[in-house]
Image (cartoon, rainbow, N blue to C red):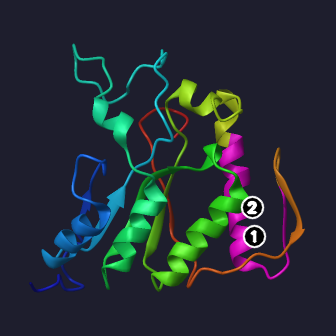
Amino acid sequence: MQRFSETNPKLGITMLATCNTLSPSQLAVEVESRGFDSLWLPEHSHIPTSRATPFPGAAPGREELPDVYWHLNDQLVALSMAAAVTENLILGTAVTLVAQHDPIWLAKQLATLDFHSQGRLEVGVGFGWNREEYEAHGHEFSDRYTRTRDNVGIMRALWSQDEASFVGERESLEPSWSWPKPSRNIPLLLGGGSGPRL
């Protein structure tokens, strides 16, 4: 199938990849073979059963979180599978909940994926809406914006500096070496719901 030219809009697919959908590698092959430019996968580490936080995407009268969210595959493992079987497909995170991750490990995982996919990674950065999920990672929900900024600063330092260091408001990185470096400056796209904080 013919790919879109530079004058045409870029089109991608966002999918909730689970154990009940096509495997990430099968999905990626199908998406690329149909001429789409990108595949975007979301993440949730887990969904606490005692969750009191309302689902922001709920339709009126339907407050329950769809159970597909309980079954999500690991975002970066799934995108790595997609990278291995495609040549041109942009691999996107929609979104990565950066503040829930250890920034040093996340920087390495993202750089490795970008390096081995020859610069095809784009990262959507999100803050998260699920208080119980976030706090299960050992952090205060109210700190997620500051922690996201600091974690992104650490990741950018690790990606761009041979001897990386960073000092943020709450998080810092002592001089450190970390490879691989990404193939290029990984595009970071801010994603989120509506409201004054965004």
Q: Quadrant of residue 58?
A: top left
Residue 134, x across and y down, in percent: 59, 33
Residue with the most extreme left position: 1
Magenta includes 158? yes
What label does residue 157 carry, if any?
1
Labels 1 & 2 near each other (Cβ < 8 A): yes
Can you identify the residue that label 2 sits on?
154
Circle 1: is it few (<14), some (14-19), or many (20+) Cα within 10 Å?
many
The secondary element bearing badge 1 is classed as helix
Q: Residue at x 33, y 25 (%)?
A: 65
Task: Establish if 128 lies above or below 157.
Answer: above
Instruction: Give the alpha-carbon distance from disc 1 to disc 2, as whole Å.
Output: 5 Å
Whether residue 2 appears in magenta in the rendering, the answer is no
In percent of width and height, residue 158 lies at 74, 71
* Residue at 42% in and 35% down: 194
Stretch of the chain drawn in magenta: 146-167
Front position in the image: 4 or 175: 175
Amino acid type, callout 1 = Ala
Name the spot of residue 105 as percent of width and height, x first. 68, 60
Q: Quick one: which residue is furthest to the front in this view?
A: 19
What amino acid is found at the position of numbered circle 2 in the picture? Ile
From the image, which quarter does the N terminus lie in? Answer: bottom left
* Main SS category, magenta section: helix
Q: Is residue 133 above or below residue 114?
A: above
Pinpoint residue 115: horizontal percent, then vertical percent.
54, 82
